[in-house]
Image (spheres, grey):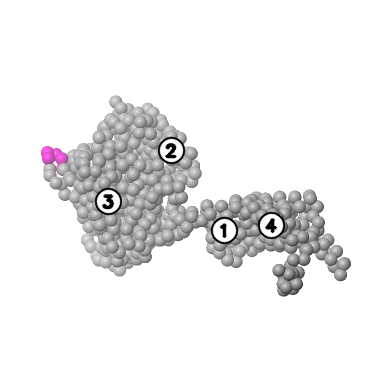
Amino acid sequence: VSPTRRDALKFGLLAGAAAAFPVERAAASLPQWFLEQPVQSPRIPFFAVPLRIPPVLRPTSTVGSADVYDITQRVARVPIVPGLPPTTVWGFNGLLPGPTIVQRQGRDVRVRQHNALSVPLSTHLHGGDVPATSDGHPLDLVQPGRTKEYFYPGLHPAASLWYHDHAVHDTGRNVYMGLAANYLITDAAERALHLPGGPFDVSSRFDIPLTLQDRFFLPDGSIVYPRHDALRPLEQGVFGDVILVNGTPRPFLRVARRKYRFRILNGSNARVYRLRLSTGEPLVVIQSDGGLMPHPVPTGDLVIAESERYNVVIDFSRYKVGTSVILQNVMEEVPGDPFDPAFTRSVMRFDVVADAADRSVVPRDLVPVPSDIRPDKAVVRRTFEFARNGGEWTINHKPYDPDRIDAFPKLGTNEIWTFINGGGGWWHPIHVHLIEFLVLSRTRRAVQPYERGPKDTVLLKSKETVSVAMQWDHFTGLYVMHCHNVEHEDFDMMLNIKVVR
Amino acid sequence: MAVSALPSATRSDLRPRPSVLLPMTVRVTAVCSLFGAEAIHTAVISEHINEWLPIGLFFVGLSVTEGVLAVALITKPSRGVIRLVLGVSLGTVALWLYTRTAGLPIGPMAGHVEEVGRLDLVCSLLELLTAIVLLPPVLRTTSNRSLAR
């Protein structure tokens, strides 16, 4: 019997219903598939551009014991990728990274930040021992066209800090667009060590900041902070496939056969690096986030998370003239990184080109860890769990609430804080404002010898628990603690701390 | 239009086809198994699209085919439909066995032997069940036709 029109209609309806679900699944998956296709910045050759060193900013004036600096946060077009048009950045004085400020312990610094951008900004001195009003709290915003003077007293010992934007919910975008720079502090104890670079000479050819940032470039040479939407949420962090060192893509540096001090800052939004020399020779760590190490720590691999700083000495006198040494990033996989690790494996190349005299030393003893941090005198223990809950980044199951204060440490007291990674496979570099801490313990993997110096950021890998000890010193007021994967921070993995008397 | 005016092949298409009498239990089992296999294949479409687009599209096609064949088994279980169901089910089981023993020869995971998972095992068992319940009626019909000649 031939099928009737009614039979055909019935079959068509039922078959359509049976096919609808798979087709719907495919339709829902394909846009994501298109987004997840490996994309790549335009071809940028490795080691074709000489390393740029950010200029050291000169004070505008000196008032009493304070040096006064003026900085304008503004849009600029800077040449980054050879052969492509200049890249639009938001920079301190229009630079990527911004100008380096050098402070001498005992001398105060006042920085007048003028916001010439079209968005509100807040400048945080990362690692700074500064009053709450100058800390750059995420809600202490400077509106477009306004200026704020930040006061940085000369309390801090020698260290490599950095200043960057910290505007609530927009730190990721603002830092990605360029608002980050080095802030170096020197002191008498450091000068007495005769480390490479010479006494009080952080701008010398032998003492060089290396600010690592990863960016993704469009074919016209521009960088665009991705839009947050349901298909491509940014919570996991924003990555790039080109590593910039001091704003230079995959650069080279000509060096002499002598020791160099490199001040490495991971200024990336979400990328964690594992640095190694291609020759297998050690990187000698002499300084961590908050100051000099008690002793130099030679290490084959150096893991440096977002916002961590390590100063390392590389002795190029081991190599013959003509040798090239590549600083590699051998981190296999960072959670959320969409790029092939091959793109980010080579950071920069050192070309040994000349002989040189070298009177610098790396003494066996550097500077003892701060004696005021006394875990044995801890009066309060606090525990913070960092996790993803209900689609939000949370600390102790709560997203950031500007009206809530989660800790009231007392001025002058010691505390022990325990950070727990609540799982999900994510990594969280935890940063506490105002203070330095000592890392006491870590589960699942050992505290690395180079993490034994004063720190203000510690990496919490998947399922790890880390305990740190700190003393709440110098200032009362409102500060914050947060994850320094800046997209985690922007999406509320942050809390308020109020230091009280 | 008169039937005699059509080419012979078309004329033969219009003749009633020999149908297979499927017991209700066989029909229900086969339809449910096919829909079950379709649901499982549908559930892994996203995963396979992200893995390799061609394999994802293959799963879309397979799911749609199984769904449409299940509907055809309900509305018009002709011998052709049953043979198609048998071919698709046994072919998919064979392909599954191949990927679990030798690995697909193409794609980003070429030569990689996949592990047997709970979901794919259930799916293959459903397809095998479909074939097992449909095979006897088809064989019976074929043998009857042979005897009639």
State the residue position of label 3. Answer: A90
Asked if residue A375 shows in the view, the reply is no
Main SS category, magenta section: strand
Do the residues at discs 1 and 4 belong to one chain?
no
Question: Could you say where residue A311 lies in the image, as x and y percent from the top left?
Answer: 30, 50
Q: Which residue is mark 1?
A: B56
Which comes sooner in the sequence, label 2 or label 4?
4
In the displayed structure, A316 sits above or below B43; it is: below
Cα–Cα gap, marks 2 and 1: 35 Å
- The label shown at residue A394 is 2
Chain for disc number 2? A
Q: Which one is in front, A122 or A471?
A: A122
Disc 3 to disc 2, C-alpha distance: 29 Å
Q: Is residue A335 above or below residue B79?
A: above
What amino acid does circle 1 point to?
Answer: Gly
Seen at 43% across and 53% down, the residue is A337
Name the spot of residue B94 as percent of width and height, x first.
69, 62
